[in-house]
Amino acid sequence: MSEGESGGAVDRSEGDVNLSPRRDAHLARHLGPRGRELVARDEAVFFRQALSTPCLDAILAAHGARLRTADGRELLDFHGNSVHQLGFGHPRVVAAVKRALDELPFCPRRFTNPYAVELAERLCAAAPGGPWKLLLAPAGTVAVGMALRLVRHLTGRHKILSFWGSFHGVGLDAASVGGEALFRREVGPLLPATEHLPPPTRGRCPHGCTDDAHSGCLERIDRVLAAEGDFAALFAEPVRWTTVELPPPGFWRAVREICDRHGVLLVFDEIPSCLGRSGSLFVYEQMQAVPDILLLGKGLGGGLFPLAAMLAKAAFDRFPAFAIGHVTHEKSSVGCAAALATLAVIEEEDLCGRVRRLGELVLGRLRERLRGHPLVAEVRGIGMQWALELRRPDGAPAVAEAEEVLYGCLARGLSFKIGAGSTLVLGPPLTIARAELEAALAILEDELGRLA
């Protein structure tokens, strides 16, 4: 195993493990006959895999912040696979998709259409630091692959620097850049020349940094890029989304300067945080650094349609003879219609402002009410994405306890994600009603109280 790839906790870094004995107990206790039947049929025909099949339940309907199971139970969804910024089935997005289906259900790749052109114009105009141009794709992992192609063409180099513990997608190219063992181990050779550094994790910095700027981490990045001189790009999540770990103050501004000094492109992967969840349309707006390439996805399709985008500096558009993002659904009329409606709702309802206000209120509430809890080591957040890191008194990750809270909350109607094995990660729709938000927090706090 390479550095950062060994150990059970790393295998859990992207989400909660679905092969836990607690899953079987949960199914036996809380699924009725219809749910059990569908889960069993699902497992019979889908490949079993971590984080997915076997499933926890079967869902028949999704509206707003709620999922309805096959047996009629309702769950408040604070997971949503990061696509549900507007909740599920937002009427504006549904109407836009239906209109596109009636008018232009598919656009062959060699043609354009008004939906795609307008979306590209809107995204490029909305992102600070342009001018930008973009390519669209049906999945974030495909957008990562496009960025890998582009940086090679631009620099004439092929080495990539990224961070252990990061997630950039499940394709072999994206997993090579990513740093999670779950997607890397036992699959044979990965993309060559993808090198990794430990991330600047506050309080547990692998470089022993004691200053807020994490100068040791910055010096290591500078030293690696300078010593080898043949890196094309640095790929990074501006915020480690699965565990909501924010960078040190000024960190990305310093990294931007280091990259410029060595002629290395800076690529920000904002696929899971897209759009508005951080309190700004794009996370990098809060990081004092403009990337050369920006990757978007998940919520871009309004929770209805798979859609991703690679934005890059317009000056990089100089390879017309190469295929950088040649995909069948490149300019999906239906997907672009969903994205346009999503952007319109975020702007017209000032969801970024709502996120900032509610985000701070919830973060303050959680910190106040969980202060002194024997297992809650840290409460952190950005916008409407919050994380509660659970550790035992000896400092070890409280993996079993985190699962106990998860299944206790699921039984009472609240779904969320566990990151890194022991971090409870909460991300509701940005449109969630205050009463629903209060109800979910009450369930979580009560389950944590019972655990204590």
Image (cartoon, grey):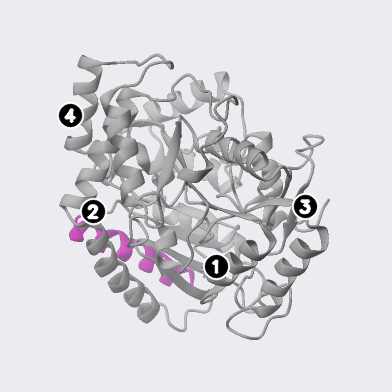
Gap in angstroms between the C-alphas marked 2 and 1 = 31 Å
Gap in angstroms between the C-alphas marked 3 and 4 = 49 Å
Q: Which residue is mark 4?
A: 95
* N-terminal-most mark, 2 or 3: 3
Q: Is residue 283 above or below residue 209?
A: above
* N-terminal-most mark, 3 or 4: 4
Q: Position of residue 421 (x, y in %)?
A: 60, 57
Q: Which range of residues does the magenta coloring cover?
A: 431-452
Does the magenta run of residues contain 436? yes
Gap in angstroms between the C-alphas marked 1 and 4 = 39 Å
Q: Which mark is residue 432?
A: 2
Q: What kind of element bears circle 3?
A: loop
Q: Is residue 61 visible?
A: no
Amino acid under disc 2: Ile
* N-terminal-most mark, 4 or 2: 4
In the drawing, does residue 151 fall left or right of residue 225?
left
Amino acid under disc 1: Trp
Q: Is residue 45 visible?
A: yes
Q: Residues within 10 Å of mark 4 (few under 14, many from 20)?
A: some
Q: Which residue is mark 3?
A: 230
